[in-house]
Each structure stands twice: as C-alpha cells, then as structure tokens.
Image: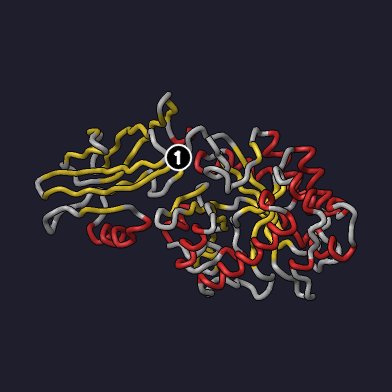
Amino acid sequence: MIPRRDFLKVAAAGIASGTFSEARGSMAVPVVIEAPYHGALLNHRHGKQVDDGLQVRISGQAALNDNVTVNGVTARRQGARFSADILLRDKETDLTASAFGVAGRSEHTIRVLWDRGSRPRYRFSIDDNSFFLRDITKKHYKSLFDCFYLDMLRQLHTKYGTRFVLNIYYQTEDGFTLPQFPDRYRGEWEAASDWLKLAFHAWANKPDRPYQYASAGKLISDLDKVAEQIKRFAGPQTYSPPTVIHWGMVQPAALKPLAQRGVRVLSGYFKKRGGLWDVNYFLDDARCNYLARHDALKDFDSGIVFSTIYIVCNNTPVEQVVPTLTRLAKTPDTAEIMDLFTHEQYFWPFYSNYIPDHLQRCEAAIRWVTENGYEPVFYHEGLLGNCV
C-alpha cells in the first residue's frame, strides 16, 4: 500500500501523474492508478483488440476495504490492489478510479491514447546534416544524387523502402549558409519527397546544447529561418516539422510554441548521465523513467508526444545491431515502434571520427526491421506515423 506521504509526492507531480481528488479524513489512503501510466500510448500488445475498441486492464492500489470502480466498472480487489478491464473506444480516454470507504471518497484520473489500427513501424532520422548541402553547393552536381550521401540513402530506399528525415543546420563552421544552396534541384526534391524529408535541427553544430537554456523566441526564430529555406529550395512537400532538436534539450516554455509550428513528436534518449536524466527535454524524473522503458508518452499540456530513440547506429557496432533490436521486440512496451537514428558526419571520410562501416550499421538496422515486418513512416504524419 502506498504510504500517505508518498502519495502526496506523486500528487504534487500532477502533470506526470494525472489528476487526484484526495479522500476526506486525515488517515484516508487515496486511490492510485499505477498502470497504465498517464499519457501512455496503448496498442494491441497492451490488451485485447475487439471490433469497436481495445480492452485494457487498469490496476492500482486503494485502502483495503474501499469499494473501487474504474469508469463505473466495479474493480476486482486483492489486498490493497485493484484491477478492472476497460474498453477504449476513442483516441484519448480519461480513466477515473473512484474509491469509497469509511474514511471517505478519493479519485485518481489519468488519460491514455489508443493507437487505433496500430501496426509495427519504424522511422529513420539522421541528425547534424550540413556536409551534403555544402558539398552539392560547391560541386554544382547535375543531380542531387550525384552526391554520394544522398545516393546512398536513395539506394537504401530502393532496396528496403526506407523513408528518411534529415535534420539540418542553417550554417556550417566554414561559413556555408542555407541561402547559398541553389533552388535548381527543387524538382528532384519534390519528386523524392514521399521518402526524403528535411527538418530543422539547429542554427549550427556549435555551441553544444544551443537551446537548453535559450528562450522560446530564439528557438522558434531559428526554426522559422531554416523552414523558410527548405521550402525555398526543396518545396513545401519536402519540409517536415522537426522531431529532434539539437541535443534534445529545450526549455519547457518552448513546447507550446513548437506545437504551434506543427511539432507533434520530439525524440530523445531519456537516459541518465552522472545520475541526472539527459537528452530529455527537461521532462521530470518520473516521465523520463517511463520513457526509458516505453515507446512513447504524450504531454497533454503541449500536445506533444515524446518518443524514445532506441538505437544510435553510429554508436552501435554492426554485431550489436540485431541483438539490440531483437531484445526490444520481445517486450510489448518497446516492440511496436522502432525509432532508428544516426548522425550524418560519420559517413564522411574527411571527418575526424569517420566510421568506415557506418553504412553497414545503418543497413543492418534497416534490414532487421524490414525482415521483421516493420513499415517505414514519418512521425509527423498521424500518430507517430499511424494515419488510421
């Protein structure tokens, strides 16, 4: 049973834990829904698919002798625990556990998302892009795909159907800027826009963590300028709202302005470094802990879904790619959506940390998801690529 002092800590989190209505009486023990989590993305792996919805189990704790209902359904009790099976019919559903006993009444409400018509899917995002744009500009190629980098991505698309989002900078350290990139390739960009998108990443590679403490105004200004250039030289069809901001850190006040610019998803690592959560967009510890073990979680205040990057190909040796993805596929909470990721610079031989087998690492990941029935998607379309 949850001690009263611990409940109060959870209730104070509010945004991460739903809405509490505490029981009357100083000794009352409030009801708490423990699973699913507030903001959880639920699919067929989390319950029983029926014709008109998804039946999921709601569980938690309440005082031993309290009568508990969930959305009006009488819950089963086993000691301090309760559970009830609820049918989800809508994209978003509020789940309210109500407990009533001698100490009074308490309620806990959470909201979850139903990934209706969900299917195994993956997206492939590449960060830190600038070298290929500079290369094309300087060498005046006849075709975009005369650049080995884009040709490599096209070959992967042709072979596996992979879709790519390239997250780009406005400028490089040697003075190249997006306004220098010609618009004469616009037709090629538009023709490839069904599988190749460009998105804002940052103004430049340096300094590190450029938006960790920057104002929302600075972030949005940079985003708008990059978006303007993408639409100029590649057409609106090629533009994608960003899903990865450089270093995965922005001020909480920037989330709503990002959502107003069409941002639906933000991906991060949600891992601890030096005992602190990092590359986590400043989400609280409870939600970071959840995302470290789940595909995604929605922040209802901003409307943004946060997703977990499962594999960074430039950090994963070829022999570890398949075991990493296979392990994720064995767990319902991480099996449905594969977030594949890497960085452009490791493909280029002149780069100081060039990885000779970088392509092989990426292809190993793409081959595995393809052979295991995952479809390529863009996260900004529908719900994490699910357009049902």
Helix, strand or loop under label 1: strand
Q: Which residue is mark 1?
A: 42
**Is 165 above or below relative to 385?**
below
Crowdedness of circle 1 by 10 Å Cα count: few (<14), some, many (20+)?
many
**Front residue of 318 and 46:** 46
Residue at image coords 89%, 61%: 140
Residue pushed farthest left? 102
The percent position of residue 6, horizontal first and vertical second, equals 28, 59
Residue 97 at x, y = what percent?
Answer: 25, 43
Whole-percent x, y for residue 83 in the image = 30, 37
Q: Residue at x 59, y 62 (%)?
A: 245
Residue at image coords 54%, 58%: 261
How is this picture coloured?
A: secondary structure
109 or 371, which is in the foreground? 109
| Quadrant hosting residue 14 | bottom left
Specify the amino acid type for callout 1.
Answer: Leu
Q: Is residue 284 left or right of residue 194?
A: left
Please, which residue is most extreme toward the top here? 51
User: Would residue 201 be seen by someone viewing this image from the given angle?
Assistant: yes
Corner quadrant of residue 156:
top right
Q: Position of residue 122 (x, y in %)?
A: 63, 42
Residue 315 in sight in this render: no
296 or 189, nearer to the observer = 189
The answer to whether residue 171 is above or below residue 260 is below
Q: How many marks?
A: 1
